[in-house]
Image: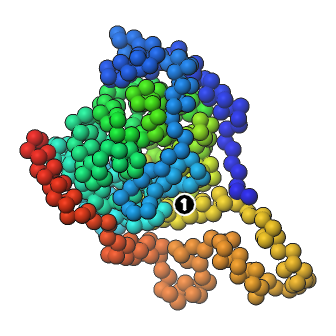
Amino acid sequence: MKTVLQILSESEQNQVHEQTLKILAKTGVRVDTSRGRRILREAGAIVDEHTQRVRFPRNLVEESLKSAPKEFSLGGRRPGWSLAVNIGKCTLQADGGAIYTFDSEIGERRLATLEDWLVATVLTDAIDDFGVYWSVVEPGLGDAMGDVVSYWRKVFRNFSKHVQDSTSNEQQSRWMLEVLQTIFGDKDTIRRLLPLSFLLCPYSPLVIEEALPNAYLETIGWGIPVAVMPMPLMGATGPGSLISTLLLCNCEILAVLCLVQAAAPGTPFIYAGAPGVVNPRSGQFGGGEVEHALLGAAVTEMGRYYHLPVEASAGGSDHHVPSIQAGYERALNWILPALAWPDILVGSGLLGGSMILSPEQLIIDVEIFQRCKRLRRGIESGEEKWLASAIAQVGPAGNFLSLRSTRDGLRAGELYLSELGVHKSYDAWQTAGKPDLLEEVRLKIAEILATHHPLPFDEAIERELDRIESRAHAVS
């Protein structure tokens, strides 16, 4: 049977929901976008234009929850690949938005470059455990429209599975849609394939700002899924307990859910809360606190409470380089969310409060994820697993090593056999030259980058993207 985890009881999940409904109805949310306020008013929300405060009646929230589809598949360019959500699968998504890279050649942190972005993007495209793209580091391309088109072109050229990202304004969204249409086809094809989901991050506490929501609303009609990721920090932008921070996060997610479903009922929606805690020593976000594991699992449970697809963020580290500390923080902060089993598990590859890319950590995180998956699978107890006849055959003081059932169990995955790290005797390790884990990982990275070639565009698509990029540069 699968390993069972419970962070919140059924009663506590109900309390989070009921408290959320009260806060949304009485306190409400500040909605900075006038377009959003108009949509919500027409859907039945109570809008105060003077304060920009919007209050959400209970029936509006409940109807919005009913409107959101519970199952759909996130697609991509790779033939035959898709990620069906809410059916028991889980995939990795690298962390995003770092501005530094830990350069193992010089042993120092430095500003990230476009080349670092390309390395991280190609690695995640090559490794099957990653099903969803994030921009792991800021590629530094600029905000002019030509730069925007160049960015989206590079994303889809170098990552062939599902892409999740955002635009900054309506104009960027229009250029992005033109790129999507060139690569994937007409609007109906994009609505069916769902190659892109849009990441929205409301401000905590209780603010739906203007720019990104307007950028997303510009895509209405294209069926683009939205992942809503508020990031309240307990003790700073969130209140002073874990459960209240989770409650605030839930309020913000459901407020945006109401806006999205009012704008286009039936829009695919991903419950993607990322509540965290502030480091009380520094007042900063680090990500290494073990409470992130509790919050990541609780977010998954609340998303499942609403029967929505879930994207859970956890697994950070306070340390700035791959290290023992980064290893134990990452492992402990992932184990509970992984056992809760979201559709998408976010957080690999970055260190130092998600500010520093480490390609080595990215590979190590895949190993941690594989071990978490094995723990989640639990102890299988089907009839063929009891092996009572083998016990009877061997009897007292025997040995099971030569039995076919022992070999069958190993081949069937009864044990997770890692291919990373040291798993031989001390003498064998010493004879091999005492190989270091980070050296092994760097060799693996070099091999992937040398042998993996992202799925190319057809020549006709490249030519059309050339024309779009030239037009965009002309108006920048």
- Residue 38 placement, left or right of 233: left
Q: Nearer the viewer, residue 192 or 415?
A: 192
Q: Nearer the viewer, residue 1 or 298?
A: 1
**Which quadrant of the rendered structure holds the N terminus?**
bottom right
Colour theme: rainbow
Where is residue 407? Give x, y as percent: 70, 82
- Residue 293 placement, left or right of 474: right
Q: Residue at point 53% right, 66% down? A: 367
Where is residue 139? Give x, y as percent: 26, 53
Q: Residue at point 30% right, 61% down? A: 158
- Residue 11 placement, left or right of 427: right
What count of labels does the image hold?
Answer: 1
Up-down relation of residue 469 to residue 393 (above or below): above
| Residue 183 visible, this orientation | yes
- Would you call the spot at circle 1 few (<14 residues within 10 Å), some (14-19), or many (20 or more)? many
Secondary structure state at the residue bearing disc 1? helix
Instruction: Write down the quadrant of residue 213 in the picture.
Output: top left
| Residue 139 visible, this orientation | no
Where is residue 37? Give x, y as percent: 37, 19
Q: Residue at point 41% right, 47% down? A: 192
Where is residue 88? Give x, y as percent: 60, 52
- Residue 336 placement, left or right of 316: right
The amino acid on which the numbered mark 1 sits, given as a three-letter code, is Phe
Q: Which residue is mark 1?
A: 369
**Which quadrant of the rendered structure holds the C terminus?**
top left
